[in-house]
C-alpha cells in the first residue's frame, strides 16, 4: 500500500508497515535519475519499495511511463544497495520507448 502526499519534492509513502520519505531527482541526463528513501531503520524492504516508487513517479511525471532500466534497483541484492545516513539510494534510466 502506498500513500502519497500532494506536491513535488519528497513524498511520504507507507510500505510494509513503515512510513518513508522518498524522492527522485534528475541525474546526468533527463532520462537518468537518482531515487532515495529514508529511514532504512524503519525497514530495508519498505525503504527500497519507497525509493522504487519515487523513481517510477519521476519517470511518469517526466515521460508518462513507469518503464525503468535500473542500474541499481529493487531487484539488486538488498545487502549491496547503497545506504548512507539512514537512506537507501537507487539509480535508473526512464525507458519510455
Image (tube, rainbow, N blue to C red):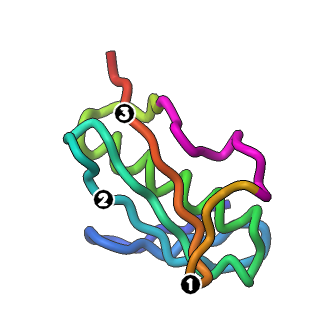
Q: Are marks 1 and 2 in contact (CB under 8 Å)?
A: no
Q: Are marks 2 and 3 in contact (CB under 8 Å)?
A: no
Q: Residue at x 48, y 70 (%)?
A: 22
Residue 6: image x %, image y %? 33, 71
Q: Is residue 56 magenta?
A: no
Q: Nearer the viewer, mark 1 or mark 2?
A: 1
Q: In the structure shown, which secondary structural element does the residue marked by tag 1 occupy? A: loop
Query: What number is the disc on residue 85?
Result: 1
> Foreground: 64 or 40?
40
Is residue 21 depicted above or below 25 in this figure? below
- Callout 1 environment at 10 Å: few (<14), some (14 to 19), or many (20+)? few
Q: In the structure shown, which secondary structural element does the residue marked by tag 3 occupy? A: strand
Q: CA distance from mark 1 to mark 2?
A: 18 Å
Residue 1: image x %, image y %? 68, 60
Q: CA distance from mark 2 to mark 3?
A: 12 Å
Query: What number is the disc on residue 94?
Result: 3
Query: What number is the disc on residue 28?
Result: none
Apparent side of residue 35 relative to residue 33 in the rendered image (left or right): right
Apparent side of residue 43 relative to residue 97 in the rendered image (left or right): right
> Foreground: 6 or 76?
76
Q: CA distance from mark 3 to mark 1?
A: 26 Å
Please provide the residue range marked out in magenta: 69-79
Quarter of the figure with residue 56 = top left
Residue under numbered circle 2:
25
Quarter of the figure with residue 88 = bottom right
Apparent side of residue 17 relative to residue 59 in the rendered image (left or right): right
Q: Is residue 74 magenta?
A: yes
- Callout 3 environment at 10 Å: few (<14), some (14 to 19), or many (20+)? many
Label 1 or label 2, whichever comes before in sequence order: 2
Q: Residue at x 52, y 38 (%)?
A: 71
Quadrant in which the C terminus appears:
top left
Residue 77: image x %, image y %? 77, 47
Amino acid at each position: 500500500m502506498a500513500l502519497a502526499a500532494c506536491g513535488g519534492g519528497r513524498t511520504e509513502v507507507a510500505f510494509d508497515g513503515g512510513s518513508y520519505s522518498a524522492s527522485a531527482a534528475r541525474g546526468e541526463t533527463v532520462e537518468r535519475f537518482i531515487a532515495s528513501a529514508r529511514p532504512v531503520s524503519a525497514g530495508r524492504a519498505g525503504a527500497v519499495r519507497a525509493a522504487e516508487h519515487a523513481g517510477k513517479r519521476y519517470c511518469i511525471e517526466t515521460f508518462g511511463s513507469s518503464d525503468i532500466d535500473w542500474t541499481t534497483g529493487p531487484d539488486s541484492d538488498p545487502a549491496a544497495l547503497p545506504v548512507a545516513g539512514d537512506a537507501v539510494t537507487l539509480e535508473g534510466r526512464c525507458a519510455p520507448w
